[in-house]
Image (tube, rainbow, N blue to C red):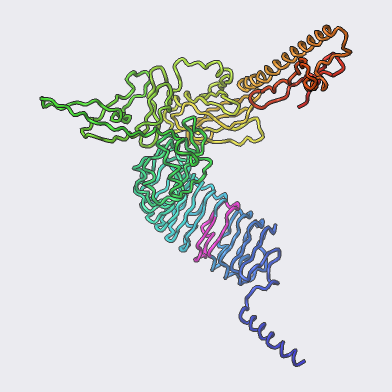
Amino acid sequence: MKVLLTLLTPLSLFLLLLLLLLPDAALPSDCPKDCSCSTLESIFCFQRHSPTIPQGVPPATQNLYLFSNGIEGLTEEDFDGLESLEMLDLSQNKLTALPDRVFQPLISLRNLDLNSNQITYISEHCFHGMPLLERLYLYSNHIKTIHPAAFSGLEQLIELKLQGNQLTTLPALSLPRLRLLDLRYNVFPTLGPEDLKTPNLESLRLAGVGLTHLDDELMASLGNLHDLDISENQLEVFPPALKEARGLIHLSLGGNPMGPLDVKDLQNLGDLHELDISSLSLQGLPEEFPKLFPHLEKLKVAENPFNCLCNLAWFPNWLKTKGITLQRTEETRCHFPPINAGKVLQRMEHSEFGCPITTRVTTTTVKTTTTAADPVTLPLSTSEAFLDPMPSDYSLDPEDDNSLPPVHASPSSSSSSIDNEMQPTSCHPNTCSNGGLCRLDRRGQVACACQPGTSGVYCEIPRHHSPSAPEAEVSMATVISDGADISSRAVTSTTIRLDLHRYIERRPYIRGIRLTYRNLSGPDRRPIDLSVPANYPEYTLRGLKPNSTYAVCARPLGTPIGMDSSCTEAHTVGQHQSTVGARVEDKRLTTMLVPALAILLSLVLIAAAVGLVCYLRKRRGKGHLNHLDCEPSQLELEGVRTSQDNGELPKKQPEALSPEPAVQNGNLEYEELLLQDHCTSNNNMCTHKPSYF
């Protein structure tokens, strides 16, 4: 008994000491119903399916997670006694309103998450009495109005997220410590310095808010800005406010109708680590691009109609050598020339860009002796001739016979041995069709000077052009809706060519075209969007389903869906209707039938010859032979040896029928004859035994 008391005394003292040190600790019995208390400070209540806050939350709780519980309302009494609470997660519930001062008992609260509810209004006193609040998340609600003084008193707030609501006006935010402000996918066409009095702001996200310009004074007031997202807005030109911006690390410009980028616009953005210039209708990138961004780590250039020509051959190797991550790689593909259309830009080899072969030609001057003082003019070598770049006033009118630029020659060198390396000054010679001359500007844009009698962006349309017979057989009739500005025709079972000439001619002001098409014949009718430059009068949709009907609509880039749009229906042909495929099958069938017929004819002739031989031998036998074999028997074949042994002259043996050689079929493999000749030893009639493969 004494031993037992001796052991219990230290244990009792330890338990007593533990209770004294942790008087307010949450024991397992203190955990609210349907909740999980993994630690003494954190409580998780997930999918309780209750419209109210759980009761009996321990006072020492610091983190309370109540997401996706179905909570429909809050009262101030719900949070009585939770002075130690620092984190409250009420996201993904069914809250429609926030009563005034409902969070006032939470004097220690630093993080409040109310995202993905159904809140429509933020009143003046919603967040009253929360002096320590640092993060407030209100995104993905239905908020239409915020009282101008709703965020007053939140002096310690460093993150405010309001994206995905229905706001059209923003109260003046005077938050001196704010670091992150997310306003994406609301409607704020303009924002000025009076709207954002946040001098320490580091991240500003304004994607999809309808911005038509970026205020210079606003950007000047945000001297600490490092992350700027202004994608999917209505910016038609590169914002001048960014030309003087310094210190940006992340910049997103994608989805704006601003068109090609100029080197001058990007000169002061050398600190960027991440850049998004997707969906800008870019045909190329400036050759100075790698030098402009020495610290770049991530790049997004998806959904641009790139001309994968020689001036873009540096791009894949630059990504690899610098270790740059190309985001949305599968959506970064070539659009032109046709041989590269659809290829993933990052995976292309240098040889696929069609760069002209660089040659080195040595020219040598000829020494001559003359009495005159005039200099001797030497013949111009081929390596010294070059073409001037296309001037700004250069005419591309196919009616102008003088549209081709003149050829100039550089002065010949006077040195005795000069190595001149030809520098490519134009794009690939096969870029422009029908003898058109191709030129590239510094931004990689393609322009073709067409010969008289041709037209089109790439001089691909001869005047009075009519499709050839094979093309007419494969192509279907043009489908034009009444009054539509776009038309289409099926080229193959998986491609449709769109004619946008009329659409572009009627809208000379547009900078690009947004094409939307969807399959009306299949179960998946999700629309697919493409951005096409305004100088592409024809565009080919690829990767379609055979024998399907597609709805195709075009609208100016940057305009809302349905505004100034023109639609048509297009049809792809079925695979079985392909004339080319039928011809291939006919050709293969002919290749197989001709040898078979020849074999059959040979067998008939052989059978006739054998029958004739049998008949003649029968008549010559004069009846002294009881039977006559069509083939020599084993004894007859051995007669040569026995007669030689007896000293007699050998009798002439009938020739044994050698088997027909194997017949080659279509250069693929060798096959046995369909029929083989065989004669029995005791019958004069020849029979045919079929062989089996």
Q: Quadrant of the C terminus?
A: top right
Q: Main secondary structure of the magenta part?
A: loop
Is 577 on the left or on the right of 315, as rendered? right
Residue 354 in picture, x, y percent from top left = 43, 33
Instruction: Give above or below for 216 relative to 175.
Output: above
Q: Residue furthest front?
A: 647
Q: Which quadrant of the figure has residue 482?
A: top right
The structure residue drawn at horizontal position 69% and vertical position 85%, both measured from the top left corner, is: 12
Residue 374 horizontal side relative to residue 519, left or right: left
617 vs 645, nearest the viewer? 645
Does 226 appear above or below 611? below
Q: Is residue 28 magenta?
A: no
* Residue situated furthest right in the rendering: 626
Return the residue nearer the eye: 558 or 601: 601
Relative to 236, does residue 249 appear above or below in the rendering? below
Q: Position of residue 517 (x, y in %)?
A: 57, 32
Please indicate whether residue 258 sits to the left or right of residue 620 in the image. left
Q: Position of residue 238 (x, y in %)?
A: 39, 41
Seen from the viewer's position, the closer of residues 184 and 592 is: 592
- Look at 63% across and 65% down and name the residue there: 78
Q: Give the quadrant of residue 639.
A: top right
What's drawn in magenta, residue-wise? 110-137
**Residue 230 seen:** no
Q: Does the image show residue 511?
A: yes
Q: Residue at x 51, y 39 (%)?
A: 344
> Is 118 in the magenta?
yes
